[in-house]
Amino acid sequence: MNKFKLQTLSGMHDVLPDDQKYFQKITKAVESVANYYSFSKIETPILEMTDVFLKAVGQGTDIVEKEMYSFKTKGGDLVSLRPEGTAPVVRSYIENGMHNLPQPVKLWYMGPFFRYERPQAGRFRQFHQFGFEILGESGASIDGQVIQMSYDILKELSFKNTTIQVNSIGDSECRPYFKKVLTSYLKSKKSSLCSDCQRRLKENPLRVLDCKEEKCQVVKAGAPQIVDHLCEACHAHFKQVLEFLDELELPYSLNPYLVRGLDYYTKTVFEIVENSEEGGSLGALIGGGRYDNLAKMLGGRDVPACGSAAGIERIVSLMKQRDVKTAKVEEPEIFLAQLGLMAKKKSLKLFEEFRKAKIPMAESFSKDSLRAQLRSANKMGVKWVLIFGQKEALENFVTVRDMETGTQQEIKLDEVVEEMKKKLKK
Ligand code: HAM
């Protein structure tokens, strides 16, 4: 049996108070872009039937094969912690009859996801994503919109050095033929592939193009490219997407080997990467693409769609390294010091009155000596200390001390909020 250790599980972490400000800044940026583009928020459960991911993400993918946290419930259902958000959103779209709403339906989400991956830089077993999904629209303009929104959010978060890598992986019309062409090329180079790719060759030859092993790079460099084998419809769609990106003046580059690790994609796929050294080692910050067949794969009707999702921890890690400014918490200018039991009791009420008046105030209810409290006030650099001792509590007044001049003034308890407002010019 494993020895019990009092620590988070490998690949999981606490989001500590010091990190919350980064999460808040990201949430604010995402919310504001989502609202502007009329996206509605959706929250799906963290647990789904395993079948949702088997059917959508695909049997032969790393996520389904190796990375899902799956278990049987007491009722005998096979369920999984969600490894990604697109399949649950499409499940919800079908289940809730969202095809009856005006199309396209635009949804965004944010929350924890789980993948049993080997923990390393930028790769966790519990991580957070925010994502956008546009469902019920086949036009290339929404591919452009999803890419633009994803890029803009990173820009808003002070990322100046990102590139959008794009590719088209075709659809059920042209991909099967390309797979044949690719497989026959890869077979001729089989002995030069890594062992994983030799296996992939049979199950999922496209994934060989995505392999990061050095051995496979040489094989990849001579491989046929899917963009040369797109059917007319996919070709025209891809051309339009690129025209939108040109029009939007977005910095993109064509990556003929970008295939993405999920089976539901059709046509456009993209990833946004950070070009700096630290960013490169983290992997993509955002990934997405079009998934016109996903609703059908889950048993629904045809629902053309496109979306993207971002890895929040990867973004936070770069924001921290660069010391990206986060919103300052309003620093209080007043400190409430209290002395004695009666004052302590009454000061809780006084503190609440200041909160209602939206005046930030610091306190240290746990410290007993006035000296210790004044020391805390000094450290915080507040301008005023409200001293509320035995005498003050009995006679219902507060002694207000100006920390810069050292002068003191007595103010009636029921007037102190208004008086302090005047002093703060609120
Ligand atoms: P994905 O590429 O698997 O796509 O994940 C999106 C982003 O989540 C990645 O670019 C990365 O930043 C982050 N991410 C993924 N795995 C981890 C991990 N183990 N630790 C930390 N961050 C991670 C999807 O999930 C699709 N659902 C995206 C999408 C939405 N496609 C269409 N709509």
Image: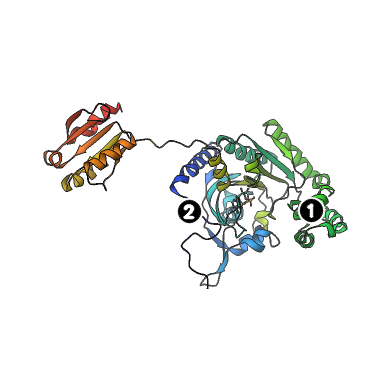
Farthest-out residue, right: 188
State the quadrant of the C terminus.
top left
- Left or right for 82, reference 221: left
Q: Residue at x 48, y 67 (%)?
A: 4
Instruction: Establish if 210 lies above or below 157.
Output: below
| First-in-chain label (1 vs 2) | 2
User: Badge 1: how crowded within 10 Å, few (<14), some, or many (20+)?
Assistant: some
Q: Are marks 1 and 2 in contact (CB under 8 Å)?
A: no
Which SS class for mark 1?
helix
Which residue is the site of mark 1? 216
Residue 14 disc label: 2
State which quadrant residue 232 falls in: top right
User: Where in the figure is residue 115, as x and y percent of width and height?
Assistant: 59, 58
- Left or right for 228, reference 297: right
Amino acid at dot 1: Cys
Which SS class for mark 2?
loop
Q: Nearer the viewer, residue 40 or 123?
A: 123
